[in-house]
Image (tube, rainbow, N blue to C red):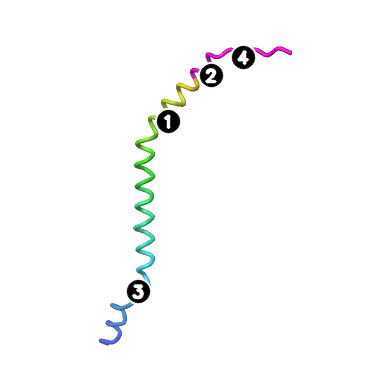
Amino acid sequence: MLNTIMEFVKSEDGAVTVDWVVLTAGLVGLGLAVIAVIGSKATDQSDNLGSFLSATQLTTTF
């Protein structure tokens, strides 16, 4: 019985899964932080570009 418990304690089978979960959660958190910081600026820039393009008159002559 003691051998079984010691083998279980020394086992590292689930350690890789825990590492991947922690790394993935960190990357998702970082991505959300980047979107929060850059998102409003990107929206403002796209609105400015849309306004500029809608105000521009295109003339084509051949």
Q: Residues within 10 Å of mark 3 (few under 14, many from 20)?
A: few
Where is residue 38 shown, x and y percent of the image? 38, 35
Residue at the spot of label 2 = 53
Q: CA distance from mark 3 to mark 4?
A: 67 Å
In the rendered structure, find residue 12 and report the number of the disc placed on it.
3
Instruction: Please name the amino acid that badge 4 sits on.
Output: Leu
User: Which residue is drawn at the image coordinates 35% and 62% (left, top)?
Assistant: 19
Q: Residues within 10 Å of mark 4 (few under 14, many from 20)?
A: few
In the foreground, 24 or 55: 55
Residue at the spot of label 4 = 58
Where is residue 4 shown, x and y percent of the image? 30, 84
Q: Which residues are magenta?
A: 51-62
At numbered mark 3, what does the secondary structure look like: helix, strand or loop?
loop
Q: Earlier in the sequence, mark 1 or mark 3?
A: 3
Q: CA distance from mark 3 to mark 2?
A: 59 Å
Residue 2 lies left or right of residue 22; in this view the side is left
Instruction: Please name the amino acid that badge 2 sits on.
Output: Leu
Q: Earlier in the sequence, mark 2 or mark 1?
A: 1
In the rendered structure, find residue 42 and report the number of the disc placed on it.
1
